[in-house]
Amino acid sequence: MESATTELVSPEQSRRPWFAIAMIAAVFVAHVVQSFWIFPTPRALMDNEHPVLLVDHALHLYHGALGSQFLREHGTPWGFDPFFMAGYPESPIWDSSSNLSILFQFLAGGGYHPRAYNIGLLVCSILVVAFIPLGARASGIRVSETAVTALLAWLYFHSEWTDMFWRSGLFSFVTASAGTVLFIGLLLRYDRLPTRVGWIMLAGISAAVWFAHVTAPVLVLGALIGFLTTTALRHTWRWRLAVVAAGVLALVVNLIWIGPFWHFRGIRSPQIFFMAPETGWYLVNQYLANDLDGPLNLFLLLVGGLGLLAWWLQGQRVRAATFGGAILVCLGLALFGGMWNLTKTLEPLRFKVPLHFLLAAPAGSLLAVGSARLARSLGGGRKGPVLVTLGWSLALGIAVIMLPNGAAILKKQLLVERPLVAGLQPEMHQLVRTLRETTDPSARVLFEDQLRLHENTDPECTHWTPLLPILLGPEKRLFIGGLYHMAFITNHINTSFGDFHLNGRPIDTCSPEYLRAYCQYYNIGWAVCWSPLSRCCFDQWGQSHRIATLPRFNSPNKPISTNMQQWKALTRRVGSERAKQYMTEGEGQYNIYRIERPRSFFLNGQGRLADVALNRIELADTTPNKGSLIISMHWLDTWRTEPPLPLAPFYVNDDPVPFVQISTTQAHKRIVLYNGYGR
């Protein structure tokens, strides 16, 4: 069995490394403080009035609230959400980052608990930087090497790319990425010390990483290949069986969400690929960029690669192969994953994050070992370490001088000058109040969404509207749009409204007849718009009447709308003067319109929607037409009725998801449509 130590370090270095321990403690304390700073105020962690609203956080919070409630009530994290998309099965198939949110809010009792989500976000932030040095240490490297690894992991966590992931809501992926380093460390430790406690820790981290994010098998694939290749003949069949058992246990634990994920795999729809460049030169150019990420990532790549080589040459081949396998898979995906549709769905550029977390361990090892060796060659004692420290200080100073832009960005990142946006703003409260006052449950609200991902044009990037059904409370409203503009499931194909596109087409190409039919199929009674083109179209449509204009929260001093597609469409539609007026008004207001049409959720037959809730729709005073009722609500294979009545899917228009048809020849005072979960 290979040695767990590094032979380049002399015996005199084996004394208790107080400096390294102090360095790890300092890094960890600094990171804990920064983890609190990411919230705008301490109050955001103390109450339920401060949901995080940046990009996808509100979406994960909403799905976590639903999933935790389903889990409490039905023992499964999936269920039917009737409030968006004319109804859809809320499951992990398109929101792969909601598992941790479900867990946080489940532990708080289930349902909507922003405080639990925020505390969970804080805990994950702390654990990410803890996982990497813990994994490095468990892999067998010395404390001094672990200290440098911790420093590098801390710096990379606060780099632009990782910070962007954290701010945009991809914290589950970042957590799983760091957890992969700990998984590798515990796997290597179990290779050296196959104890019962070691097996429990290995099985536990395997289950936790997989629970955190669906891509965990991809993250650990290369590590497992490298590990098994270099240990194939080392262990007995009992040891191999124990490792397999740890993996099986992780699978069994995660069946609670893998089951729904697999069951609903068929509702995935073709997607627009994010973070999937078609050439590897995109990543190369990022490494050469004059910012913080470019130099830091290139440093980790080069030094980490040399660290892997040093491990191999020192005889630490299992460690080198295990880390190296995982690194090669992540690097390969980041470079070339955008070339094939199969890997495009993974958003391969995101694998930059686990790539550089993994590189932190061999890079930290090489830097620590090399520094110790250099100190000895300079005379040892106190003189050598002092000279090495001066040398590193000089190198750091030169880097700051040569890369002033990166240094300035790093300062802002470490001081957390841009905390998360948490808590509803006055404009949001005003919109909720107005929706209560101007709409009612007789019809749906068509709500224009926005894909807010680009902080260079919209630094706040707030996307809070997934919380609308919760914020409205007992004043229940159903929405088309508002949840997420890029929901890649079939239920969303015809029920999308965002960024001046209705049902996937520019709204100015929708004729009055098309709008009339659309509003009939989905029972639209009101529309809420913010984009200049959408506001113009509803201003001109004869069946819509503006009933309110409200301020819309956006970044301070945001310039007027400069979208050329909207400008050209507006010019064709209303002329240059009116187009200029709409564009000048920009995106800082909501217009609310009332759609003048008969309200009914019944496309065939008559009745009314008496009540709506998760997994449950109550119909009242129904009268069938030609032996059936057709409800403007998407089909679910597990729908059941009380009293029991025959159900069948009914396709309407070009919606790929059918509506619900209830076969009956009698009038009913009350029919309850509910999700029977296949029972």
Image: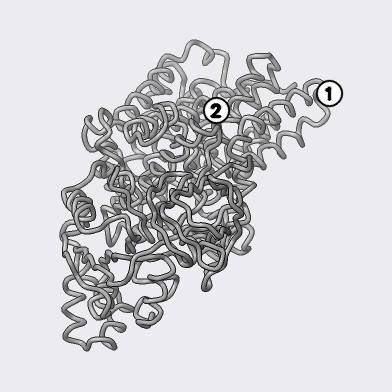
In this rendering, which labeled residue sits more in front, label 2 or label 1? 1
Q: Is residue 352 visible?
A: no
Q: How far apart are marks 2 and 1 (CA)?
A: 27 Å
Residue 502 image offset from top left, x and y in percent? 39, 71
- Residue 657 vs residue 166, the one in the foreground: 657
Q: Which amino acid does label 2 sit on?
A: Ala
Residue drawn at x 42%, y 31% is 110
Relative height, residue 297 to residue 583 (above, below): above
Q: Do the residues labelled 2 and 1 touch (CB within 8 Å)?
A: no
Residue 277, label in figure: none
Residue at x 41% of width, y 55% of height: 621
Q: In what element is the residue under mark 2?
A: helix
Callout 1 crowding tier (Cα within 10 Å): few <14, some 14–19, many ≥20: few
Which residue position holds label 1? 237
502 is higher (above) or lower (below) than 356: below
Point out the tag, 2 or 1, that comes first from the N-terminus.
2
Mark 1 residue element: helix
In the image, taking residue 310 as reference, residue 634 lies left or right, namely left
Q: Tell me the residue at 50%/11% (across/down).
A: 15
Q: Where is residue 343 in the image (x, y as percent from the top left)?
A: 61, 57
Q: Residue 314, how many percent across, how many down?
A: 67, 30
Query: In this picture, is 481 found above or below 72?
Result: below
In front: 539, or 345?
539
The residue pinned by badge 2 equals 136
Q: Residue furthest front?
A: 666
Colour pattern of the rendering:
one colour
